[in-house]
Amino acid sequence: MATEALRVSALSGHAIIARLSRLATLGAMETQVLQAAAESGIRLPAHSEILREDEPIPSAMIFLSGWACRLRHLADGRRQILSFLLPGDLIGVCRQRRAIATTTVATLTDAVVCNAPSPPQGGGGLAEAFAVSGALEEVYLFRQITRLGRLSAEERIVDFLFEIHERLSAVDLVTGNSFPLPITQEQLADTLGLTSVHVNRTLQVLRREGLIELRGGRATLLDRAQLKLMIDHRPGRVSHA
Amino acid sequence: MATEALRVSALSGHAIIARLSRLATLGAMETQVLQAAAESGIRLPAHSEILREDEPIPSAMIFLSGWACRLRHLADGRRQILSFLLPGDLIGVCRQRRAIATTTVATLTDAVVCNAPSPPQGGGGLAEAFAVSGALEEVYLFRQITRLGRLSAEERIVDFLFEIHERLSAVDLVTGNSFPLPITQEQLADTLGLTSVHVNRTLQVLRREGLIELRGGRATLLDRAQLKLMIDHRPGRVSHA
DNA sequence: CGACAAGTTGATGTTACTCAAAAGTGGTGG
DNA sequence: CCACCACTTTTGAGTAACATCAACTTGTCG
């Protein structure tokens, strides 16, 4: 965890506040606590490990900017990316004592993280927001399982793009139908259980059909209606009105 | 949730106590609370839904006996089984208010469930055990993702059998290398992202090689050493010391 | 310009899927 | 006890999706 402490502009704090305040009602105090935490962010270069499998989790953290992933290595070198961490996500929130990380978490881009305030025991908006965030994380794991188990390569890619679109929307990082996607085709392959060659060919099909655009670390959904017909997209919901 | 209330013998309570008391240190009081809960179990026939996607979660429950699964249906009829519920597992434990189920949960066999005692806020062994249980559940989701994304059909089956073996061990349901596996090959296929035809053929290979036995709802690992060479088995650990 | 990572292409191989049907299993009622 | 039914397992033949291997191209950055 190579680090360089620094003041991060107030802007970097926005993602977590934008996200959590949509997941639960935060008091002014709670927003301030988050704001303060976000201002003591730590910059991490790309490819640094935030957590390492089987090692203690030092403290709960907030992912303020950049991209990271949870991943698992197999003995023979195969890798599986389990999920992505996007701005506004929580890392290492766990309720048991002496917790150890069950997966490695590594940045994919330069990133900024900060320690998460410990949510007060008695409930309250922040505790609620943390709980909802955890439940959403589980929903995305379920979707990932379904993608890998039952969707074709083309469907996996489209479904994945919709999921990232949805998550980045929650932190105001989507511009129209376009959003950052700073990952390589090989990383996409390790996420979707494919080879990078096959990802490449499948992307070409989607591009030729005018459905998506993918260049320079950004993705654009050119024909949302058509793309939605290819998959069974249900936005993540974990509680009702 | 077709139901028939009845007293369930004390024996049915054992799974949950066996499991949770290994996950954290329970006080005598806590054990008694669990015992009491387990004695008011409700019998469910096979193929009943415990939770339905998008509907409110009535209360946290304990799965006392039988098998159930979390699953997701796609619009075109494809199904993905996400995970299994085994005796001693918790269902529907969530910390946010007005929670709705994000997946369907359905019994695969006749089963017995009871309401879970709400763990006291202030911590304590039971709260700790619930937390560890939740963390383990997440570990098994990670493993499921890795299985589907990066393992061959043969590896998926072997890895899955080890996982079930490990989980049933925790509730004393393994006899030697043999344990109950009351699911059809089609359900196994829906779990492992394969077709039932391919599961069948792969099982035959494993049988012919004398590695496993699968009959009458029971599985036996005939050659653990050899099987372990085929996969990268790491038992689920979520805390240290 | 050179070096290195990422993306692209082609040829070929393999795993797993599809479709269809037969054989086995267990439970039910006559 | 047998006949029947539904479900599960098994088998075969043909096919589609995705992997592998190896090269070549493009882009990026110092």
Image: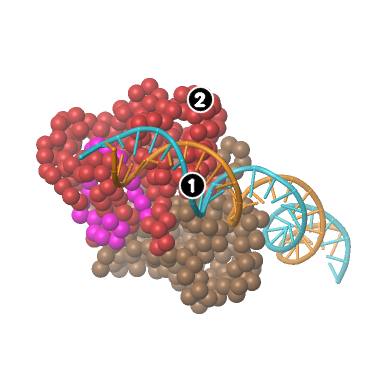
Chain colours: A red, B brown, C orange, D cyan
Q: Which mark is residue B84?
A: none
Amino acid type shown at disc 1: Leu
Give the residue pinned by disc 1. Answer: A194
Amino acid type shown at disc 2: Gly
Residue drawn at point x = 61 percent, y = 64 percent: B203
From the viewer's perspective, tell me whether residue B213 is left or right of residue B124. Answer: right
Q: Earlier in the sequence, mark 1 or mark 2?
A: 1
Residue density around tag 1, few if under 14, some if 14–19, many if 20 or more, within 10 Å:
some
Give the structural element (helix, strand or loop) at label 1.
Answer: loop
Residue density around tag 2, few if under 14, some if 14–19, many if 20 or more, within 10 Å:
few
Residue A220: x and y in percent read 41, 27
Closest to the observer, A83 or A197: A197
- Residue B36 counted in the magenta span: no
Q: Can you say whether A36 is above or below A48 in the image?
A: above
Chain holding disc 2: A
- The answer to whether residue A231 shows anywhere in this view is yes
Residue drawn at point x = 30 percent, y = 65 percent: B24
C-alpha gap between disc 1 and disc 2: 22 Å
Residue A199: x and y in percent read 48, 41
**Number of numbered discs:** 2
Magenta region, residue range:
A52-72
Residue drawn at point x = 24 percent, y = 55 percent: A57
Q: Can you say whether A40 is above or below A222 in the image?
A: below
Q: Which mark is residue A210?
A: 2
- The answer to whether residue A24 shows anywhere in this view is no
Residue drawn at point x = 47 percent, y = 65 percent: B231
Q: In which quadrant will I find the C terminus of chain B?
A: bottom left
